Amino acid sequence: MLRRVYVWEAPVRIFHWAHVASIAVLAFTGYYIGNPFITVPDETAQTYLMGWMRAIHFGAAFVFGLGFLVRVYWMFVGNQYASWRDWLPVSRDRWGFFGRQLKYYLFLAKERPHYMGHNPVAGLSYAAFGVMVLVQGLTGFALYAEPYADGFWRAAFGWLLTLFGNQTLRWVHHALMWLFAAFFVVHLYMAILADVEERNAAITGIVSGVKFNHAPDH
């Protein structure tokens, strides 16, 4: 019989979807800022449109950043499935499970390991995602600080402009956007694959918080 398990707590679910929405807005507006693909005849209106795109982009960045900080906080106060230990293979058992899961993904094993939370390969990929978010945030806030001659933003992030320059920061920021897009595609594919093969509500679980366990819990 299947056993219902409350895996994803409300803060995890809420900020998961906040991240999805904000990343979609950031990708659209960020791509427009780098390559204005919507043109209007009036130059003033074009400038006005760019201003709105930048404002929306920065607003979505703050939403994403807040959600990311809450998620990091929840790693230390949430349940076992939200814990940072579910992201990093810090134990010997977790490394063993990592090897089993990686073999399955590389088509070297037929049996799929079952996990209620993040499997070790997914968990480590989310840790890498966190590093990408950190770099994206630093480069983004540095570019945000560029118009300011002084003040908080310039003092906090202006050193990146001095150290790397505008164009390097823009290139890194833009390249990471495409890495986020690739991560989204792979993440969605893996979630659907897990739902189909394990039949544990991997997709609906991030809405309801509940997954179904029919194997030993890892």
Image: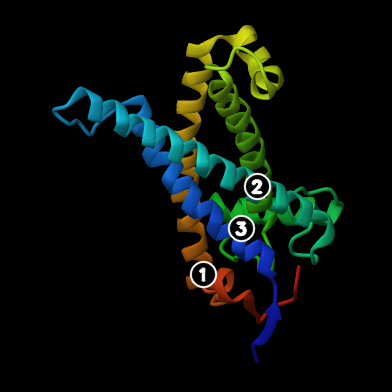
The N terminus - image quarter? bottom right
- Residue 115: horizontal and vertical position, in percent? 68, 67
Q: Quadrant of residue 34?
A: top left
Give the residue type that dot 2 points to. Leu
Its colouring scheme is rainbow
Placement of 119 over or under 218, stated as above or below: above
CA separation, marks 3 and 2? 9 Å
Mark 2 crowd level (few <14, some 14–19, many ≥20, 10 Å Cα):
some
Q: Quadrant of residue 38?
A: top left
Q: Earlier in the sequence, mark 3 or mark 2?
A: 3
Give the residue type that dot 3 points to. Phe
CA separation, marks 2 and 1? 24 Å
Frontmost residue, 153 versus 71: 153
Residue at the spot of label 1: 203
- Taking the view exactly as shown, the residue that stands out farthest to the bottom is 1
Q: Quadrant of residue 101?
A: bottom right
Mark 1 vs mark 3: give the one in front.
3
Q: Residue at 42% of width from left, 32% of height from top?
A: 54
Frontmost residue, 18 versus 96: 18
- Res. 15 mark: 3
Q: Earlier in the sequence, mark 2 or mark 1?
A: 2
- Residue 155: horizontal and vertical position, in percent? 70, 18
The C terminus - image quarter? bottom right
Residue at the spot of label 2: 66
Q: Secondary structure at mark 2?
A: helix
Frontmost residue, 82 versus 195: 82
Mark 2 vs mark 1: give the one in front.
2
Residue 24 seen in this snapshot: yes
